[in-house]
Image (tube, coloured by chain):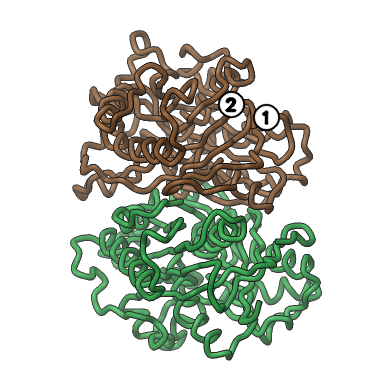
Chain colours: A brown, B green
């Protein structure tokens, strides 16, 4: 590993992403990426009594599927890194309580998936682990209930709001394997742009995405065109446009090869999600389903994946606080 | 680094704990450890409008104090690892939003402090970082409001309940320095003993503490007597007794050199906290204040620090769920 610039880590023995798994809910099944997910459910409860228990089942089944696909025995995993949006991250801890693998709970709001993958890659490159599993999840119903209003109220949603994705995604990282590889890590700093509108997360997180993107490009000396594709998750339609504009002010044009997982997962015209998808499960499932397949198919050989999180809660918004954001980035390449 | 047994990592180039910092509230000021803390406040609000903002101030001031004490410039810190009990860990993210150091949010409930130190030590041993800061916090008032009842109700507390400590603790880890050193890491697995009483956290977490303690002893081939002291945090009085009993069933007698941070921080007779202290800030402040000073004074040369967390939330208890526990352990020794 070699640190370059202010805070990017080039993995000289890159960490392989052996495989991924993704399970999504009914609205995601109706979206344009449905063929890329391992499983699309018709029932948001998945046979459980509550949304919280359903979300835990998403995590459990997705992680088990990822482990089964890898062919590696559960006992040969050194660590699990996981987190979610529900208070005290119970989707992960209840979903994974029978996993019997040393567990690190991680919270980075919607940046959790990449934060987990960064910590997982560091544990492998640092010699602590051979195999790790990284996961995150979100559920529209449990998130709405907790962050906004009970669904039964039938509240109108603000035009700038995003739709929390019901999904879980998981990746298996290993120091063995033929790739694709995680080749660089750029962990992010907390950036608070002073946005106070909890219905406009994309705007609140765009500054953090910019900070991490520019740090990564400056540290590596790369242009955006080095990558076949740059993905954020989840700025949505509004945040995506802001990031494109902000990048221009820093001298980088990302318009031609950049997209956002929250934009990709739903059909803007037909699905009425306003500014697109969000939630820890959005980038997790879009990466684990769609992007990973495109990399396997060699349609994308070099990808920069930037996960963004809004580090607020319902109380902080009620108390008039602004919304701090964070963004973590990893480079994924077919070749070492 | 050398992995021994099932899951203990011996750091052959041990990570130095350069210094620590701790700030506590008024009830902790009245407790027996008050002289060991850097600052004891008389006002739980610390001049802020809300308990949540006060807790963020605890984190901010404690981390800044730890950094200042270290003499290391803020820009020379590679990472910050931090977390807390408040929904979506806002105490940490709001408290540290001006820190300008790459940030990893961590959630392990009351195990967060040691989880942060494990991840920090791994990032240093793995060559990613030179200096990191690790922190966690809790606040009695914000925690009661969130997990139980509004304080204004004046509810009776159950006899087995613990008193959330108002405090923050922080440690500065470095690959330079004369110690004391983190010499071994034993990350824990989630263990669910089926306890459903959210007013008896000690019982719920004792099984996880046992699992990590026994794993550590078996992995290293050590007896409890290898350590001058073994500390858990925070099983409280009830959980402490359970751990002593459970350890006996596994063939280990820890009675003579074991104590719990939740037991130590309050005076059982005079302070009426029932089963003792708890919260992410308890082990963080007791370690950063009391235990670290005892190590500097050479009164304790070898310490095993086991932080325990109850991975539930208010909703999971209302839904009749049991309480999964986790415990993470680090060895701290004066000599490498």
For label 2, the crowd category at 10 Å Cα-Cα, with few meaning under 14, some 14 to 19 and many 20 or more, is many
Name which residue lies at 68% across and 83% down: B255
Q: Quadrant of residue B181?
A: bottom right
Residue A327 percent across, percent down from the top left: 40, 40
* Left-right relation of A259 to B206: left
Element assignment for label 2: strand
Judge depth for marks 1 and 2 and give the one in front. Answer: 1
Mark-to-mark CA distance, 1 and 2: 19 Å
Q: Quadrant of the C terminus of chain B?
A: bottom right
Q: Which residue is mark 2?
A: A22
Disc 1 is placed on an element classified as loop
Residue A179 is tagged as 1
Query: Does residue B333 lie above or below A323 as drawn?
Result: below
- Callout 1 environment at 10 Å: few (<14), some (14 to 19), or many (20+)? many
Report whether A236 appears left or right of B240. Answer: left
In the rendered structure, the answer to whether residue A159 lies left or right of residue B109 reads left
Q: Residue shown at 55%/54% (left/top)? A: B128
Q: Quadrant of the N terminus of chain B?
A: bottom right
């Amino acid at each position: 590993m070699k640190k370059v610039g202010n805070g990017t880590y080039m993995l000289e023995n890159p960490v392989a992403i052996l495989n991924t798994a993704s399970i999504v809910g009914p609205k995601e099944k109706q979206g344009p990426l449905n063929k890329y997910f391992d499983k699309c459910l018709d029932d948001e409860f998945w046979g459980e009594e509550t949304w919280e228990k359903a979300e835990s089942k998403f995590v459990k089944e997705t992680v088990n599927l990822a482990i089964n696909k890898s062919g590696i025995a559960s006992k040969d995993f050194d660590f699990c890194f996981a987190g979610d949006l529900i208070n005290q991250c119970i989707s992960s801890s209840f979903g994974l309580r029978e996993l019997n693998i040393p567990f690190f709970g991680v919270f980075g709001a919607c940046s959790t998936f990449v934060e987990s993958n960064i910590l997982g890659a560091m544990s492998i490159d640092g010699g602590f682990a051979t195999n790790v599993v990284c996961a995150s999840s979100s559920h529209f119903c449990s998130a709405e209930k907790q962050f906004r209003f009970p669904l039964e109220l039938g509240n109108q949603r603000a035009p700038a709001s995003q739709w929390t994705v019901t999904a879980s995604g998981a990746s298996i990282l290993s120091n063995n394997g033929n790739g694709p590889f995680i080749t660089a890590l750029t962990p992010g700093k907390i950036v608070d742009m002073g946005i106070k509108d909890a219905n406009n997360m994309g705007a609140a997180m765009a500054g953090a995405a910019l900070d991490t993107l520019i740090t990564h490009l400056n540290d590596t000396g790369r242009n955006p065109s080095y990558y076949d594709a740059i993905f954020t998750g989840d700025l949505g339609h509004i945040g995506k446009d802001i990031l494109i504009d902000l990048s221009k002010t820093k001298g980088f044009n990302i318009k031609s090869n950049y997209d956002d997982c929250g934009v990709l997962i739903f059909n803007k015209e037909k699905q009425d999600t306003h500014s697109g998808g969000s939630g820890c499960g959005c980038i997790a499932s879009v990466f684990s389903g769609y992007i990973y397949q495109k990399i396997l198919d060699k349609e994308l050989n070099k990808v920069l994946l930037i996960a963004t999180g809004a580090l607020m809660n319902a109380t902080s918004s009620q108390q008039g606080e602004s919304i701090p954001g964070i963004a973590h980035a990893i480079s994924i390449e077919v070749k070492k």
